[in-house]
């Protein structure tokens, strides 16, 4: 029999599944592995959120099928958060949609907006789901290179006119994964102006909007005048509150796009478990001191890792957002060669830049989502064991 479909057959193995497989093999052979590859926070979900989840799970009506558009408490909490954080007003009924994690919404927005053969404009490097969702929708993608020289921002004027004519969606992502790049509001204004000129909807992935350092405050693309005419923004509670396993997120913005996405979702899935939605609403509305504390921890970890990289000749400008470090590989190494060298010499897993797109060659990504003692151990191993031909 012919398994699977051609559509599924074109999808390469999920990168982090392959990393986990290699990790398991090395652990089985007795090697102490420190995994700085996957961005799954090790910090605990704050206690008050867990307690709220347990409370809501005791209420019988919360255990029935949830609404696919989200419970009213969660949607209102998202709208309140946007007004408080960004000064953006949202109608919780028409401009907010609950998601089973932002990854689900990102994957579903593609078939919502494109037909087979249409193009999606995708940052390169970027979160792999943008490309994979496009392929699964029988679409095509155009990589928008992100370079250090351009501050890891796409140059919209470099996109060929023939591609623009066939493009039905553009992804953006700031603070960025994997680049950890950040932008200010003028960049989003440029993006919105470009999108409106060419009638290309923007989906901004804002999963790391609250993981920021020092005085930097990540803007929302919806702060730009006229953004709601052409853009939606995806958000997640996974990183902000260490709620990755809860699988709860949202999309906000253009009501026509959100209505179309809700139609697709209502025919392919249900809503997230109601107690999780209500715990998420509580997280957004309650004491936010845990966010500042977790950001302080990530900042301390980042400083330690940057010092460790500097000790072996790798210089990186400190990121202002996300919990990733996007670092150049040393001379004479490809991304894959350097990652393999580090793994073999130290047992530390880092991610090659090419895992996120062809423009990731020459870089590697470090995740700071491990306990501080393990991160410090990784830093020390790199200092002691990694031999690099810098010149």
Image (tube, grey):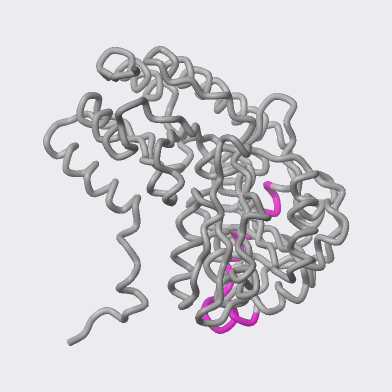
What's the residue at 79%, 71% (across, down)? Answer: 93
Q: Position of residue 250 (x, y in %)?
A: 65, 60
What's the residue at 71%, 63% (across, down)? Answer: 232
Q: Nearer the viewer, residue 11 or 381?
A: 11
Q: Looking at the image, can residue 141 be seen? A: yes
Q: Position of residue 101 (x, y in %)?
A: 55, 59
Q: Nearer the viewer, residue 245 or 87?
A: 87
Task: State left or right for residue 80 relative to residue 3.
Answer: right
Q: Looking at the image, can residue 279 be seen? A: no
Is 267 contained in the magenta span? yes
Task: State left or right for residue 329 relative to residue 199.
Answer: left
- Furthest toward the bottom, the residue is 1
Q: Is residue 328 above or below residue 80?
A: above
Task: Please state the extent of the stretch shown in magenta in the rendering.
Answer: 263-283
Q: Position of residue 306 (x, y in %)?
A: 48, 20
- Magenta region's main secondary structure? helix
Task: State left or right for residue 252 relative to residue 364.
Answer: right
Q: Is residue 135 above or below residue 129?
A: below
Write down the quadrant of residue 194 in the picture: bottom right
Where the N terminus falls, by quadrant?
bottom left
What's the residue at 74%, 65% (across, down)? Answer: 96
What's the residue at 80%, 51% (across, down)? Answer: 189
Number of marks in picture: 0
Is 274 contained in the magenta span? yes
Where the C terminus falls, by quadrant?
top left
Q: Position of residue 203 (x, y in %)?
A: 65, 61
Q: Nearer the viewer, residue 15 or 273?
A: 15
Q: Is residue 311 above or below residue 296?
A: above
């Amino acid at each position: 029999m012919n398994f699977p479909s051609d559509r599924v057959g074109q999808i390469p193995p999920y990168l982090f599944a392959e990393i986990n497989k290699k990790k398991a093999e090395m652990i089985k052979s007795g090697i102490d592995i420190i995994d700085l590859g996957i961005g799954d926070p090790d910090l605990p979900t704050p206690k008050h959120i867990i307690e709220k989840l347990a409370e809501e799970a005791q209420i019988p009506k919360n255990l029935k099928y949830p609404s696919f558009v989200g419970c009213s408490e969660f949607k209102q909490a998202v709208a309140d958060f946007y007004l408080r954080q960004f000064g953006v007003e949202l109608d919780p009924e028409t401009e907010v949609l609950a998601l089973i994690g932002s990854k689900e919404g990102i994957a579903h927005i593609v078939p919502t907006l494109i037909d087979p053969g249409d193009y999606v404009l995708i940052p390169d490097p970027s979160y792999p789901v943008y490309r994979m969702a496009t392929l699964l929708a029988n679409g095509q993608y155009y990589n928008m290179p992100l370079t250090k020289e351009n501050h890891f921002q796409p140059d919209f004027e470099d996109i060929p006119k023939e591609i623009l004519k066939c493009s039905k969606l553009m992804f953006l992502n700031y603070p960025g994964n994997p680049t950890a790049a950040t932008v200010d509001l003028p960049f989003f204004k440029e993006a919105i102006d470009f999108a409106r000129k060419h009638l290309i909807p923007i989906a901004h992935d804002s999963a790391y909007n609250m993981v920021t350092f020092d005085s930097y405050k990540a803007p929302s693309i919806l702060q730009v005048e006229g953004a709601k005419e052409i853009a939606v923004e995806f958000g997640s509670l996974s990183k902000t509150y260490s709620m990755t396993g809860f699988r709860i997120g949202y999309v906000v913005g253009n009501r026509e796009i959100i209505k179309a996405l809700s139609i697709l979702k209502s025919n392919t899935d249900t809503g997230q478990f109601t107690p999780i939605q209500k715990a998420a609403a509580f997280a957004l509305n309650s004491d936010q001191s845990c966010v500042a504390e977790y950001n302080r921890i990530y900042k301390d970890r980042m400083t330690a890792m940057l010092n460790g990289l500097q000790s072996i000749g790798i210089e990186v400008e400190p990121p202002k957002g996300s919990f990733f470090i996007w670092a150049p590989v040393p001379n004479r190494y490809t991304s894959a060669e350097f990652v393999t060298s580090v793994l073999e010499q130290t047992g530390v897993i880092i991610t090659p830049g090419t895992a996120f797109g062809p423009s990731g060659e020459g870089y590697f990504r470090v995740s700071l989502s491990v306990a501080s003692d393990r991160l410090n151990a990784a830093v020390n191993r790199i200092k002691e064991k990694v031999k690099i031909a810098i010149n």
